[in-house]
Image: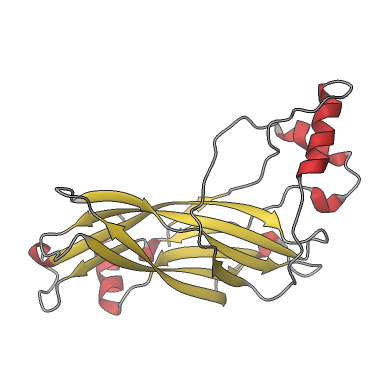
């Protein structure tokens, strides 16, 4: 199945601290600013944070420079966290809801949603790197259909954690996002509330051993429609 992958990662913030030379200032700031929380380890879990996720675009240190700075920290637990693979499940990237009893005719369409992107960031959950917190949010394009009865629509979706081979589901969290259409508006783009996934780490589990999948929660009829019409 076709998937759209993103590989989010953490980068040091803008560096400014008095000291001896730019490199010394950067190293001191990086060592001080990469802090971590210490929640207890556990099985992979997906929980809502209740906040909107904000993504920033800004200047980042070149990779080799950042590694050189962090190498002088003296504490490997402060290295930037690596993210697992994150993907939109192609068969579940679209959701079309029709009026009950109206079949799948265009005139019976109430709302059509499409996942168009995922953004996220990763942070270690403890100084010992015993777990990884992955916070992500999904961008959805929605269209109000001719059979819609109101100006809001609830779109059910899920976030799931699987192993590297994606054959075994370790955890799955269904949830719902509400889309609101303004007056005289039939199309809109929304971003879901951010969700946090906690993945246990250790000698036997690393970030690359997991895959995080997102998609709409579909009925058998909706899944069959997606497979019949293919990617859009």
Residue 21, given in percent of the width and then of the height, sits at 86, 20
Report which quarter residue 209 is drawn in: bottom right
Residue furthest to the right: 74
Residue 148, given in percent of the width and then of the height, sits at 15, 64
Which of these two is toward me, 76 or 191?
191
Residue 160, given in percent of the width and then of the height, sits at 52, 70
Report which quarter residue 125 is drawn in: bottom right
Q: Can residue 188 be seen in this view?
A: yes
Q: In this view, does 207 lie above or below 182?
A: below
Q: Is residue 68 visible?
A: no
Q: In which quarter of the image is the N terminus?
A: bottom left
Residue 231, given in percent of the width and then of the height, sits at 31, 56
Q: Report the coloring of the rendering.
A: secondary structure
Q: In this view, does 155 lie above or below 184?
A: below
Which of these two is toward me, 211 or 58?
58
Q: Which residue is drawn at 89% across and 38% down?
A: 72
Q: Which residue is drawn at 68% across and 31% down?
A: 14
19 on left or right of 112: right
Q: Which residue is drawn at 80% across and 49% down?
A: 78
Q: Which residue is drawn at 81% across and 22% down?
A: 22
Q: How many labels does the image show?
A: 0
């Amino acid at each position: 199945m076709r998937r759209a992958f993103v590989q989010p990662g953490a980068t040091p913030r803008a560096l400014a601290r008095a000291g001896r030379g730019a490199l010394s200032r950067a190293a001191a700031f990086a060592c001080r600013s990469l802090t971590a929380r210490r929640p207890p380890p556990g099985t992979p879990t997906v929980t809502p944070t209740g906040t909107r996720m904000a993504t920033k675009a800004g200047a980042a240190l070149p990779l080799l420079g950042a590694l050189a700075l962090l190498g002088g920290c003296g504490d490997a637990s402060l290295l930037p966290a690596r993210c697992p693979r994150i993907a939109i499940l192609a068969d579940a990237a679209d959701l079309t809801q029709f009026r009950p009893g109206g079949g799948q005719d265009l005139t019976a369409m109430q709302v059509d949603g499409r996942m168009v992107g995922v953004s996220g960031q990763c942070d270690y959950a403890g100084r010992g790197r015993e777990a990884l917190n992955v916070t992500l949010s999904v961008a959805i394009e929605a269209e109000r259909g001719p059979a819609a009865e109101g100006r809001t629509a609830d779109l059910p979706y899920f976030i799931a954690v699987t192993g590297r081979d994606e054959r075994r589901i370790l955890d799955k969290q269904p949830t719902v996002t509400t889309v609101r259409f303004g007056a005289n508006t039939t199309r809109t783009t929304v971003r879901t509330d951010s969700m946090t996934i906690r993945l246990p780490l250790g000698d036997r589990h690393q970030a690359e051993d997991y895959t995080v999948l997102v998609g709409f929660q579909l009925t058998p009829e909706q899944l069959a429609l997606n497979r019949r019409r293919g990617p859009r």
